[in-house]
Image (cartoon, helix red, strand yellow):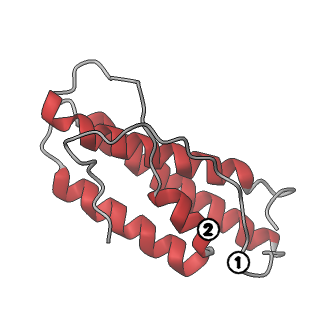
Amino acid sequence: MAPIMAPSAAPPPILVTFDLVWDSPPIQDVGEKKRIREALGNYMQRGMELRDRCATDELEADAQSWFVEVQQYLRKNLDSSYLNQFLLTHPDPLTPGGVRQEMLPLWHGLNQRTQNLSRFIDQSTPSQVH
């Protein structure tokens, strides 16, 4: 299981592109598509709330719990391409104000994972989910 926190020493920049690749049959049921979008939206909201707490709280345990829960959901309800994309991060020049230096790796990990979830939701609009 990959930790949510980035290593303290930043690796050299790596460009990562994301292509949606399906390992499983397309989801045809509109109700199932909606249920998945809503679940991803709930995970995204919780991730953003955790990210926003980085300025004031010690929340590594809460963030790690969220991270594991999302991974389990993706494994169970979607295919491996979603899990792999969720786990990938890339260098992010954005530095949030008000977040302590030691919390920045956690903030970046949460921010990138919530952005990945947002992209999954965009890709799963009723006309786009396979």
Q: Nearer the viewer, residue 109 or 11?
A: 11
- Disc 1 marks a residue whose amino acid type is Asp
Q: Position of residue 63 (x, y in %)?
A: 27, 54
Which element carries disc 1, helix, strand or loop?
Answer: loop
* Left or right, residue 39 beside residue 58: right
Closer to us: 57 or 113:
113
Please name the residue shown 15% across and 27% down the image. Answer: 100
State the residue at coordinates (73%, 71%): 22
| Classed neighbour count for the residue bearing mark 2: other residues with Cα under 10 Å, few (<14), some (14–19), many (≥20) | some
- Residue 81's label in the rendered image is 2
Whether residue 83 can be seen here:
yes
Q: Which residue is mark 1?
A: 23
**Disc sitting over residue 42 in the figure:** none
Residue 67 appears in which quarter of the rendering?
A: bottom left
> Is residue 118 left or right of 42 when viewed as pictured?
right
Amino acid residing under circle 2:
Ser
The image position of residue 120, as x and y in percent, is: 63, 54
Residue at the image position 42 percent from the left and 32 percent from the top:
92
CB contact under 8 Å: marks 2 and 1: yes
Element at label 2: helix
Q: CA distance from mark 2 to mark 1?
A: 7 Å
Furthest residue toward front: 12
Quick one: label 2 or label 1, which is nearer the N terminus?
1
**Is any part of residue 49 visible from this angle?**
no
Q: Position of residue 90 (x, y in %)?
A: 46, 42
Q: Is residue 32 above or below residue 62?
A: below
